[in-house]
Structures are given as C-alpha cells and as structure tokens.
Image (cartoon, rainbow, N blue to C red):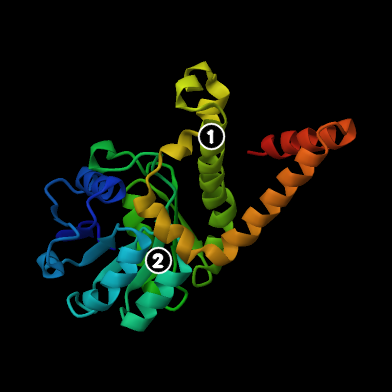
C-alpha cells in the first residue's frame, strides 16, 4: 500500500463504513472517498484502487459477483463482515484476485453513521485473511494500520475466525437477547425500572438490530449451533440442581476463573 492513495470506495455507509471514511481522511486529508449505498449503482465507485465492503454479510456475498465486473484486477478489495468463510468462498467464485477478507473488532451495540468515529479502530484488532493472495494481504495490512488498527493475519480461508467469533461474539449476542426476552416475559416491561446495573450490563448487546445479525447467524450456524446447544444443556442442568450447593459452587468458581482471564 503506498503512503498515499488517490481514491477510496466504501460500499455501506453505516457505522463501520463511515468510520473507515473518517479514519482514512484523518490519515490522508483531502482523500476522495466515494460512499456507495445499497440503492446506488455499484459503478459509482469508479476506478478506486481500494474498495471496502462494509455491508451485512449477505449483502457482501450478493455484491461480489457484480463487483468483479466493475473493479480493476489490481484494486485491493476488503470486506468487514462478521463472518469470513462464506465471504471468502464467494470472493473466490467471483474471481476477485486482490480480495482480502477482513473483520475489524470495533463497533457497538448500536449502529448507523451517526455513531461513526475517526478513532473507532485505534489499537483494535482487525482480522485479515487470504492465503492465496499474500501481496494483497500485505497491502491490506498497511491500509488497516493506516486507519489505526492492529492487523491480525490468519492463515486459512476464514474457518478459524468463524470458530472464534462464534464463541466470543455471536454466542454472547444471542445470549444477551435471550436473557432480555426471558426477563420481560417474566416481569413485563412495566417492572424493568426495578432492574439494577447487573441486568443493564448483561443485556447491553440486546439493543443490536436484526439487520446485521440475521446474515451473521445464518452464515456461521455450523459453529454457533453446538455452542448454543451446550449452553442450553448447561443451564438445564443448573436449573435441575439449584439446591445442590456443590454444583452451584463449581458453576461459580469456573466462571470466576474464566472471567479473570478476560
């Protein structure tokens, strides 16, 4: 990646896409950034040498075949989707030679361009992968580091990323939603004002909208499904043994040991 770039195209001007734009302009003042929304013709990105796909996973997969007919073979194309293997396979099928799968570990429970910040990626891990295009990965490392992120290069086609994210990101999201639903079903919304910080903290992610998560869960169901089934079985066993003090003690002690590493 050169010290300067002439033009940057970003498909998906939400939280991540707009933050990429702000971070890029911070690094390269005066940079020509073309934000392409879902309703815009993909051709509006023109001949940008760097293209960032910052849309939901299913939208990225749908864009890739059309993108291959628009971008230069030399253009660096990155995505920011929350799952990687399905996107990597779609990019390979589309024949985009300089494609690098990416996932910045930044964001929040709420999305939208209004939450975007130029420093969103500062010091945050940004996963990158495509073992079939090492030159493109090298360019991508330089690009995301210029945005302030810490590049983490994986050696496979996204499988390890998806396995990790199922546990540390997707499972907590689903669990937070399930907890919020269970509480409201038990006490109703009128009694939520009695809740303390414990419920607020553990259900923060329940404010996330379905627009992004529908495709994330669908594209990573193979990794997430067994984790959810294990969690459900563990909760069922605990429910049946609440009067077993040894069981409860082991449950809390294991959690405390794990939490101390976080």
| x then y, percent, for residue 28 | 19, 49
Q: Tell me the quarter of the image containing the C terminus.
A: top right
Question: Compared with residue 208, is residue 230 higher up or lower down, i.e. above or below?
Answer: below
Label ID, residue 13: none
Residue tagged by mark 2? 101
Residue identifier under label 1: 185
Q: Please indicate, yes or no, whether residue 211 appears anywhere in the rendered image.
A: yes
Residue 234 picture location, percent across and down: 74, 47
Mark 2 is surrounded, within 10 Å at the Cα level, by few (under 14), some (14 to 19) or many (20 or more) other residues, namely many
Quadrant where the image shows the N terminus = bottom left
Q: Which one is nearer the viewer's eye here, 153 or 35? A: 35
Q: Seen in the image, is 172 located left or right of residue 260?
A: left
Identify which residue is drawn at 44% across, 71% down. Answer: 86
**Viewer-side residue, 241 vs 12:** 241
- For the residue labelled by badge 1, is the local secondary structure a helix, a strand or a loop? helix
From the top left corner, tell me how far across and down residue 208 is, in percent.
40, 42
Q: Position of residue 87 (x, y in %)?
A: 40, 70
Asked if residue 256 lies left or right of residue 183, the reply is right
Relative to 223, say whether 204 is above or below.
above
Q: Residue at 52% of width from left, 16% of height from top? A: 194
> In the image, what residue occupies the spot 73% across and 33% down?
256
Residue extending furthest top?
194
């Amino acid at each position: 990646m050169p010290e300067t770039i002439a033009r940057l195209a970003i498909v998906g001007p939400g939280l991540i896409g707009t933050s990429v734009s702000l971070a890029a302009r911070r690094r390269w003042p005066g940079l020509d950034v073309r934000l392409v929304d879902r309703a815009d013709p993909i051709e509006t990105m023109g001949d940008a040498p760097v293209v960032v796909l910052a849309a939901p996973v299913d939208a990225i997969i749908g864009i890739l075949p059309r993108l291959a007919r628009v971008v230069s073979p030399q253009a660096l194309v990155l995505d920011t989707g929350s799952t990687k293997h399905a996107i990597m396979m779609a990019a390979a099928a589309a024949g985009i030679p300089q494609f690098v799968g990416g996932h910045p570990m930044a964001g929040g429970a709420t999305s939208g361009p209004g939450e975007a910040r130029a420093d969103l990626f500062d010091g945050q891990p940004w996963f990158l992968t495509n073992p079939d295009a090492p030159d493109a990965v090298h360019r991508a490392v330089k690009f995301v580091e210029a945005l302030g992120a810490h590049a983490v290069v994986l050696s496979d086609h996204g499988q390890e990323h998806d396995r990790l994210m199922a546990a540390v990101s997707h499972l907590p999201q689903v669990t937070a939603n399930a907890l919020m639903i269970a509480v409201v079903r038990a006490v109703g919304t009128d009694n939520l004002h009695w809740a303390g910080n414990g419920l607020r903290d553990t259900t923060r992610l329940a404010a996330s909208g379905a627009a992004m998560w529908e495709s994330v869960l669908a594209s990573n169901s193979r990794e997430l499904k067994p984790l959810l089934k294990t969690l459900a079985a563990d909760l069922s066993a605990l429910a049946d043994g609440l009067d077993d003090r040894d069981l409860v003690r082991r449950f809390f002690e294991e959690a405390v040991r794990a939490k101390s590493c976080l």
